[in-house]
Amino acid sequence: MQTPALVVDLEAVEANIRTMAAARPGTALRPHVKAHKCTSLARLQRDVGGHTGFTCATIREVEGMAAAGLGDDLLLANEVLDCTRLGALVDAGTARVTVAVDSDETIGAAAGGGVREVLIDVNVGLPRCGCRPDDAGRLADRARSRGLTVRGVMGYEGHATAVHSNEGRKVVVEKAMHALRTAHERVGGDVISAGSTVTYAHNRVATEIQAGSYVLMDSYFAPMTPEFRPALTLELTVISVSSRYAVADGGLKCLGMDHGPPTLHADTPGEVLVVSDEHVTFVPAQPVRTGDRIRVVPAHVDPTVAYHERLHVSNGDVWEVDLRGW
Amino acid sequence: MQTPALVVDLEAVEANIRTMAAARPGTALRPHVKAHKCTSLARLQRDVGGHTGFTCATIREVEGMAAAGLGDDLLLANEVLDCTRLGALVDAGTARVTVAVDSDETIGAAAGGGVREVLIDVNVGLPRCGCRPDDAGRLADRARSRGLTVRGVMGYEGHATAVHSNEGRKVVVEKAMHALRTAHERVGGDVISAGSTVTYAHNRVATEIQAGSYVLMDSYFAPMTPEFRPALTLELTVISVSSRYAVADGGLKCLGMDHGPPTLHADTPGEVLVVSDEHVTFVPAQPVRTGDRIRVVPAHVDPTVAYHERLHVSNGDVWEVDLRGW
């Protein structure tokens, strides 16, 4: 196995899927594929977890899931202004596609592009997409007037993921879900879609949770949800050793850095000094030699996986990261 | 053109190539392809700049350059412990390959893998690869005893790129190059390879400069080298607008974030608030509407380009980013 290589602990992945499925069985969870961009892993979420609907962040993710035969109920939980590729999937009958809308323009794009089902995306406090809660009813009416089926609402309480204490997070989630429930009363439909790995336990309003990170985990979310096991490491080869530090052969082009640098795995302990394009310079806690393999835990899984062509599974399988791009 | 999309200003690229080639013509520059991972752009560096040797950071970059017919003189300016893929290129006659070595192990890998030419990589102050300057002569002897041709030394003064003042950077470069010259006296050979976009003007020792960023530039390096024009922007579509901010359709999976978030381009001014997986939330300086296109300037080009499959060129061409992966 050539380094840098992402390695998946299959036992931990399956344990994570079972843990989440126990709390959120079947369609009560709509796993978000943006966290892993891998249809092999999504299939495991269906087969082991029993989840048949999935959340996507990009058109390419929707297309890839449909092509992999996982298109029973795909939600593009994001606004798009050209829905023709999505509409083509609906026309071909390869996927049921629902898209988030939060404006007249995105409703027009859905209707014009051939998508038939939407959720009204409601802003519940995160500075991102979503309409004002008090505008949700108007948008639902407008969508229906364009011939679209409004399945309900979504509202991502992503601002709660920055709150590290459980109690603090619960307060933020409850406030956000109060807003989403209010919007839902104006919109109607069966679906209230929300949530994430670090808020699912506090969310009593959502009919489905859009968690993604729980499958692989990362060093940022791990302390907040100890019920899930870290399942993804980046394996590197030590290529240079000096008296003060050592250097391994992977860096900024195989690690999402927005949540900071990776941490060394407990099996090969030490401290990361600096990360450059193709290198991690680190101070090993125990002596290492040129040629040794080390493992690091990415700080943020999603943009890390997006750099890689494949995941190396602990049982010897290789999974293609086949949902990359747009 | 679907967004998010990297857009290359071809006129700026050619101006940058000419500016650098005027200071460092022909083989006095060994352009680093890690900055763009694109053989179409490397070909322009050869054809417009007259540079025939290139610097690579990964085996895949070497293979891709050889496959594109750009293998006249490829330096892998990095340590590797399995040189069989490089040796295969040498055996096939598709490329001249020189690899950096800084230890007995990497010398053994070069000789064992079928690479015939090396540079002794010398640590000149950056906490990364490279032997101690006083060990360079011993390593050169060892490499020659293994049948390798030692072409000279390399030593990357990357720590100077963190010094923003010209004068301060000059002092760091001079100290680093003093160490490299000392090592070269013990090693011999024709090549002293070093440098970068923000140190080339201060480097009086290197026979060849390994600059990469100068072609496309980014918002981090630009203030240090105003002679080069920003040539790369990320084009995004505004997908949601609220009273306080707007949201565009690209984020952490299309932007290297180690040097911080991107900045809005002067043509579509404003302030970036937050970057998430597939979104940039920003405060526009002038009103924007859903469906508008905006442009951002990446803070760090190299890990940004590595996320993308292609570059959209201002003349309508599309260049594949064909050197990704390892």
Image (cartoon, coloured by chain):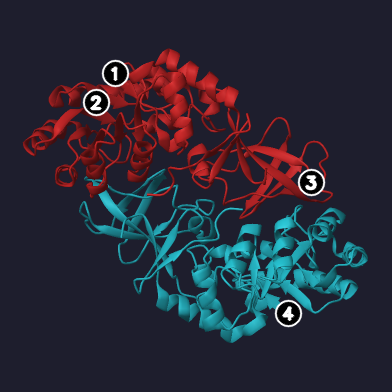
Chain colours: A red, B cyan
The N terminus of chain B sits in image quarter:
bottom left
Asked whether A76 or A173 is in front, the reply is: A76
Same chain, marks 4 and 3?
no
Residue at the disc numbered 4: B207
Residue B203 in sight from this viewpoint: no
Whichever of callouts 2 and 1 sits on the residue coming sooner in the sequence is 2
- Checking the image for residue A205, the label placed there is 1
Same chain, marks 3 and 1?
yes
Q: Could you give the CA–CA distance between mark 3 and mark 1, rounded to whole angstroms?
A: 52 Å
Badge 1 sits on which subunit?
Answer: A
Helix, strand or loop at disc 2? helix
Residue A69's quadrant in the figure?
Answer: top left
* Residue B70 on image: x %, y %: 60, 73
* Residue B276 on image: x %, y %: 41, 43
Residue A21 in sight from this viewpoint: yes
Residue B182's quadrant in the figure?
Answer: bottom right
Q: Are marks 2 and 1 in contact (CB under 8 Å)?
A: yes
Q: As displayed, is residue A152 above or below residue B105?
A: above
